[in-house]
Amino acid sequence: MATSSGSADDSVDEGVSKHTSKIMLSVILVTIIILAALGNLLVMVALCKDRKLRKKKTNFFVVSLAFADLLVALVVMPLAAIELTTGQWKYGETFCLIRTTLDVLLTSASILHLCCIALDRYYAICCQPLVYNNKMTPVRVSLMLVGCWVIPIFISFPIMQSWNTIGIESFIEQRKFNSSHNSTCVFMVNRPYALVCSTVAFYVPLVLMVLAYQRIYVTAMGHARRIGSLHRAGSAPSSTYPNHNQQGSSRIKNETKAAKTLAVIMGCFCLCWAPFFITNMVDPFINYSVPWQMWTAWLWLGYINSGLNPFLYAFLNRAFRRAFLMILCCGNEHYAPQEGFNPSRRQSESVNGTSISLRLINSKSMKGQKSIFKQTKKQGAQNKCVRLWYVFS
């Protein structure tokens, strides 16, 4: 009796533990999906609302990247999250093929967009302005954007034809059912497809990004050193030319910050996608012995990159931050602090505005009271946006 009751208690505790872990996993996955969707949606809305952002060629790649990552967050991630939390695939083999096709298509498109952004920044920073304008013409930018979507279509098309499973049907049958005998959406690839897909979708873009960002990093640090040497050479008469020294210090900080930003971007990209694509190439050569838990972890690490991209490519950009501020302030440009805005000046205006309001109240003028209400409401919105500006700056 004691033994049976003890085993029953253990099974109950195990069931509660599994249920708790499922809830925690669901909360984490839903949070990732929501942040990825909102971040990428905010980038797209910002580009639509701000004309200045639309004038810069790089931002067309950024908004197309945001669209690809938004689809990853809305289409690919939820289906993967449902299968991971429930432990089974309920939607049949045809929908499993559609899901894996969209998965490969959208994630490959996201990676190729990152490569195009790296090339665009290389031409913009490491080449003369005339060279950049000759290289990045509107036609060439359009062709690069089309390529970012057409190449992934060719990569994912064999999945719908089941060409990626030729010769490995027996391995797939073994994995169709998990330890609980529930059906799963199996995605396995043969050696030729693994080599071609990984090379085109990851390794070629990776090499191009490394070369581009390496040259950009060297150029940025070279600029910082030259500015620093000029700044030190002119440090003696600093009292005569204080503004010149301040501008030199500011440019050194900007160049150094740009170099550090590139290192962060490259590090996040490699950290998120390298484990998956290394495993993708190795697994077919070791008889598909990589456990599914590792596959799932590497895949979600790649999905997280779609949520990081808005922060890395847009939120670190001052022009995008100002556009985000406009959106949060209901689209009113007047509330977004302009270049060189001074909080102390804003505060003095607030004090003066208050004294004006008091004088209007003493006059007991209805028109004055309406003006006070509008001014107070406007001042409150301005103060809110000033606080937001400090958050985004």
Image: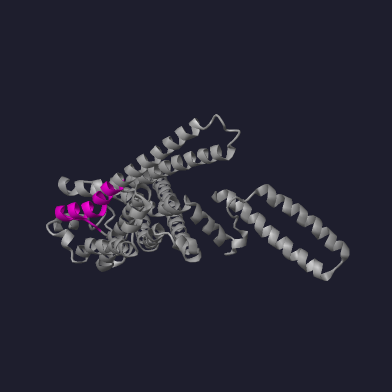
How many numbered dots are placed on residues in this image? 0
Q: Residue furthest left?
A: 167
Q: Nearer the viewer, residue 151 or 73?
A: 151
**For residue 197: magenta?**
yes
Horizontal and vertical percent position of residue 174: 19, 55
Q: Residue furthest top?
A: 236
**For residue 56: magenta?**
no
Q: Nearer the viewer, residue 72 or 31?
A: 72
Horizontal and vertical percent position of residue 319: 50, 55
Magenta stretch, main secondary structure class? helix
| Quarter of the figure with residue 368 | bottom right
Q: Is residue 211 left or right of residue 38?
A: left
Q: Residue at x 47, y 43 (%)?
A: 254
User: Can I make out residue 288 in this image?
Assistant: no
Horizontal and vertical percent position of residue 337: 60, 55
Q: Nearer the viewer, residue 361 or 89?
A: 361
Q: Is residue 179 left or right of residue 380?
A: left
Magenta segment = 186-209
